[in-house]
Image: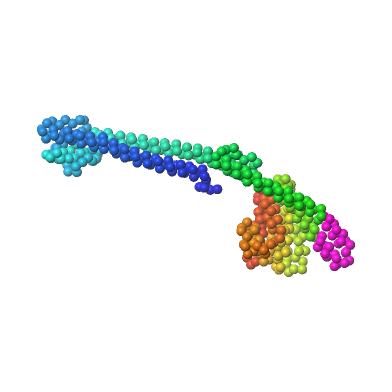
Amino acid sequence: MKKTDSLRRRIIGAYMTFAIAVSAVFAVIAALAVEGIEEKLVDERLEEVALWAAPRHTGGMPVQMPAGLSFHHGADIPRSLRGLPHGVREITVDGTDLHVLAGNDGHGEFVVVDHDSEYEKIEIVVYSMFAAGFLAFVACSLVLARFLANRIVTPITVLSRAVEERQDDLPCLERDDELGVLARAFAGRTGELKQFLDRERFFTGDVSHELRTPLTVISGAAEVLISRTGGEPGLQAPAERIYRAAREASDVASVLLRLARSPQGLEAPPQSVAELAQYEAARCQPLVAGKPVVLRYLDGADFTVHGSRELLQAAISNLLRNACAYTEQGEVVLRLEQRSIVVEDTGPGLPPAAMARLLGEPVPDNDGASSGTGLGLGLVQRICAHIGAELHVRQREGGGTRFDISFPADLTQS
């Protein structure tokens, strides 16, 4: 899973977006409040001073202004303050910020100047406090978001890890919230699947075990027939076919019996893949006898696989048998590549339905009845899954099929 797809990141992102949006709203409200206070404290103050000073100046009375304020009328107005539009505004004169109220009292123009207002400094302090509060709020929101995300996601992570590890007792089963419902649903479904797999495993094991005795009897009887019909080719050939079929069925039963066991319960001694491949190639040579098909084993770099010899032989043998059975002319090639066993043929290729089954894709409706490739490929797929290998299949250019059994590094040794 990508980090951008993490539920924890999504929760933190949503919480931080909400926190920043709320902070922005409060910042706008605070800015409007500061501007409103400025108008109340400064602008109205200058207007009150003008209402008091203008009549006194007109009446010839002395106009004594508080410290920091000055009143100028007519010709007394400084040149830098003349011609200003009526109303209150902020201007800068000789590097000094001034609040100036310009007006007309009927006897001439006047201005009231606030030289010593500390409101700009107060504004800076207020906005700095708002900025510090915003950063503190965002930081606290981030901490809280991470805490909440961990509280929400950690139980889900623990539950998913327990499901992946196939633990018998899942966590969170006792919870009354949605996570508890999910955990109990997982537990119920896992229990059903476990019972189904156990039934399938026991059935496969029991059937394979029960088949071994009659197959052994058939093989023994076929050997007796072969020995007693040595001079009668018409009888010996069927007896040999019976013997080979019984041995192949016995091998399949043994493989199914091993597949019914847990992989952890099987021994995994080191096996030379080159030795197994060469042996199976020689054993399958009779399958192409009488056909314009050549079965070749191309040597490659040998490597060792830790696994059951019987299962490895069955995987190679079934691929070779399937290739030899469906290839009418050309060649079947078995070779070793880097940690892989490769079987290629020049046959007609797999039917679409068989290819879909191997790739785990939907089977085409129009190919369901004619897509059989025998038990071999399905058995190879099960063997690969059982021993931890991967089966890859693709059609060759010019016709035919290529199968690769790839082994992970932890199962192999050069």
Q: Is residue 156 left or right of residue 232?
A: left
Q: Residue at position x 73%, y 58% from top?
A: 317
Q: Position of residue 238 (x, y in %)?
A: 82, 64
Decide: is 275 above or below 175.
below
Foreground pick, 93 / 23: 23
Q: Position of residue 191 (x, y in %)?
A: 65, 44
Q: Residue at x 29, y 36 (%)?
A: 37
Q: Is residue 226 above or below residue 81?
A: below
Q: Is residue 288 something one can see in this rendering?
A: yes
Q: Which picture quadrant has residue 337?
A: bottom right
- Report the predominant secondary structure element of the magenta stretch: helix
Question: So how many labels did they put on this image?
Answer: 0
Q: Is any part of residue 335 visible from this angle?
A: no
Q: Is residue 230 above or below residue 40?
A: below
What colour-coding does the image apply? rainbow
Give the residue at x 47% y 37%: 144
Does the magenta run of residues contain 79? Answer: no
In percent of width and height, residue 168 lies at: 65, 41
Residue at the extreme left of the image, as rendered: 60
Question: Closer to the camera, 313 or 204?
Answer: 204
Give the magenta part as a residue range: 216-243
Residue at x 48%, y 39% (from the top left corner): 145
Residue 33: x and y, percent? 31, 38
Is 235 part of what is drawn in magenta? yes
